Amino acid sequence: MALVLHVLSLRYSSWSIRALLPLWHAGAEPEVRTAEPILTHQGKREAIVDQEAHVREAAAELARRRELGSVTGNFPVLEVDGIRIHEALAICEWTAERFPEAGLWPQGDLARAQARALSCEMASGFGNLRTHMSSHPFARVPHFQPDGPTRVEIARVHELWAQALEASGGPFLFGRFGIVDAMYFPVLLRFETYGVELPSHLRPYATALHSLPAVKRWREMATTAPRIPIYDAYIEKLGGTV
């Protein structure tokens, strides 16, 4: 079985991290190919002045991303014997089914449903956290002050982690490492980047995540991954270091 995982730079891409960790944890060894799309001059965080030019650039960029292995223009994408699976959570689901011995979902039906619910909540929610605390795992932004809606989402993450850990006994959200932990690991990285302090009862969970062999492997690979200047510039604009 030939596996190729197309990712954006693992120095930044939270969704690529989410797809990769369960694969490695399950013992899969995909070839990891890093796509380097050309970001348009507008960038993600700047106003679009010339709408027609933007449409032309966006169409060209979509075509180029498809040449690089994408389906919708987004990454990650997993190729299994040439068949492409896009969306990180779908890749995680395939991994769980293909490697059942890895136990990436809880065994009990109710716990499994809860873990899926929390994973879907991460995939579809927390828009303020994503917008104002963009993924940049190795950066540090001192004195960052999240706004009110973002603080609400931070509190929700703390709450759901605490509830799951209390119910399972830890060390991971549902006992053993699973997809739900992979979904939230990049959130922990965001907290570390922007100086969001964890309550004391959640710190062992953070330690457990960072101790995973798959996470250590990601960190080693990410430190040599390509830089994306526009992402670094955003952190520097906030007064942070990259």
Image: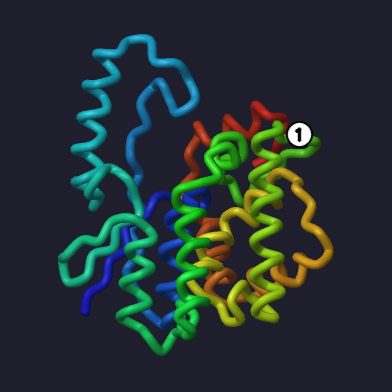
Which residue is located at x 65 percent, y 79 percent? 168
Q: Is residue 41 above or below residue 241?
A: above
From the image, which quarter does the N terminus lie in? bottom left
* Residue located beneath label 1 in the image: 145
Toward the right, the furthest residue is 200
> As rendered, which of 43 and 111 lies closer to the eye?
111
Q: Residue furthest front?
A: 110
What residue appears at the point 50 percent right and 54 percent down from the top-left corner? 121
The residue at the far top in this view is: 49
Work out whether residue 164 or residue 22 is closer to the camera in this orientation and state it.
Answer: 164
On the image, the x and y values in percent for residue 14 come to 49, 52
For label 1, count other residues whose C-alpha is less than 10 Å away and answer few (under 14), some (14-19) or many (20+).
few
- Quadrant the C terminus occupies: top right
Task: Report the coloring of the rendering.
Answer: rainbow
Q: Quadrant of residue 126?
A: top right
Residue lying farthest left?
82
- Residue 220 appears at what percent x and percent y? 56, 65
Asked whether, in this view, residue 6 is left or right of residue 17, the answer is left
- Residue 82 location, x and y as percent? 16, 66
Quadrant of the rendered structure where residue 61 is?
top left
Q: Give 34 or 193, whichever is nearer the viewer.
A: 193
The quarter of the picture where residue 199 lies is bottom right
> Label 1 sits on what residue type?
Gln
Q: Residue at x 30, y 13 (%)?
A: 51
Q: Residue 144: x percent and y percent?
A: 75, 35
